[in-house]
Amino acid sequence: MLPSNQYSFQLFSSRAGDLDAQFALLGTLGYTDVQPFFFAPPENHDAIDAQIALMQHYGMTAESGHFKLSMFDDGPDLVAGIAKKYGMWLVVVPWIEPEDRPTTREGWQAIGARLEQISDEMAARGLTFAYHNHEFEMEPLPDGSFPITHLLGEKVAFEPDLAWIAVAGQDPAEWLDKYAGRIPAVHVKDIAPAGECLDEKGFADLGHGVMDWDRLWPLSCAAGSRLMVVEHDLPNDWRRFATRAMASLQRLAQTEIAK
């Protein structure tokens, strides 16, 4: 089981809310870590400093963050500098734009080579680098191989989003086993029953969907995850999601203790 300070909240889930209100509620609910996201380099560091100040005011940390791939291409010191300000040890690429996605093994391998280079650049700066999946990396190519295996290669760490793996028709447990020891964090997400929550992208609040987290939680911990990051891509009410997700986190933790 992970200690409670390793239960993290991906701030993309509450992106429409006032920042102070977000941290106030998250702190009240018992979250002590958040996962910020960056779609582009900041125009200045005032917004970053303000977020860090609020984070610290409410007694939270940010051990990890999501950074668009192009930010790493702007230079390794850009991302490393932001990460160091927050106190992160893990930096993650969460997305490849549709127009940049190859259709061949060789194309994905080329991106994988770049990710390996980034991994080395971040390691030289004292940071762990990982890649985060959606469904498209988990769908087989014409030759039967998977984009994710070409992206991760032999050394890139993996932050699996288990719900997106399931959306792609794959068994999340098999991928946890495949990359055990290379998984520093896991995205904890749930899928609504078929035909439900269509206005929420088909996702459900953690513990209120069809994902078997009683099975996947201990497997995630056994695979080496140090951070369990709850997320919902499009909640109608992020406060509802954050509240119900924490209740589910606590239940899962207690179940693990009882074993």
Image: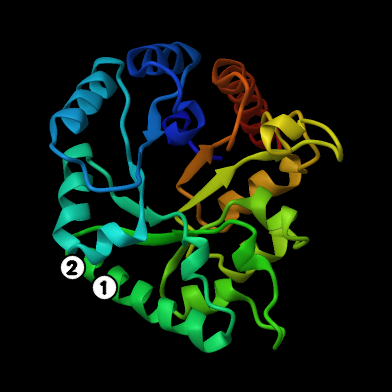
Q: Which residue is mark 2?
A: 124
The residue under label 1 is which amino acid type? Asp
Answer with left or right where residue 34 lies relative to residue 167. left
Q: Which mark is residue 120?
A: 1
Circle 1 — which element? helix
Asked if residue 105 is positioned above or below residue 79 in the image, the reply reads: below
Contact between labelled residues 1 and 2, with CB atoms less than 8 Å apart: yes
The quarter of the displayed image where residue 155 is located: bottom left
Q: Residue lying at the far front in this picture: please name it.
A: 99
Circle 2 — which element? loop
Mark 2 and mark 1: Cα distance apart in space: 6 Å
Q: Is residue 7 visible?
A: no
Which residue appears at 37% of the width and 18% of the height? 23
The residue under label 2 is which amino acid type? Ala
Front in this rendered view, residue 165 or 104: 104
Answer with left or right where residue 132 lies relative to residue 203. left
Residue 181: image location, x then y, percent: 50, 65
The quarter of the displayed image where residue 177 is located: bottom right
Dot 1, crowdedness within 10 Å: few (<14), some or many (≥20)? some
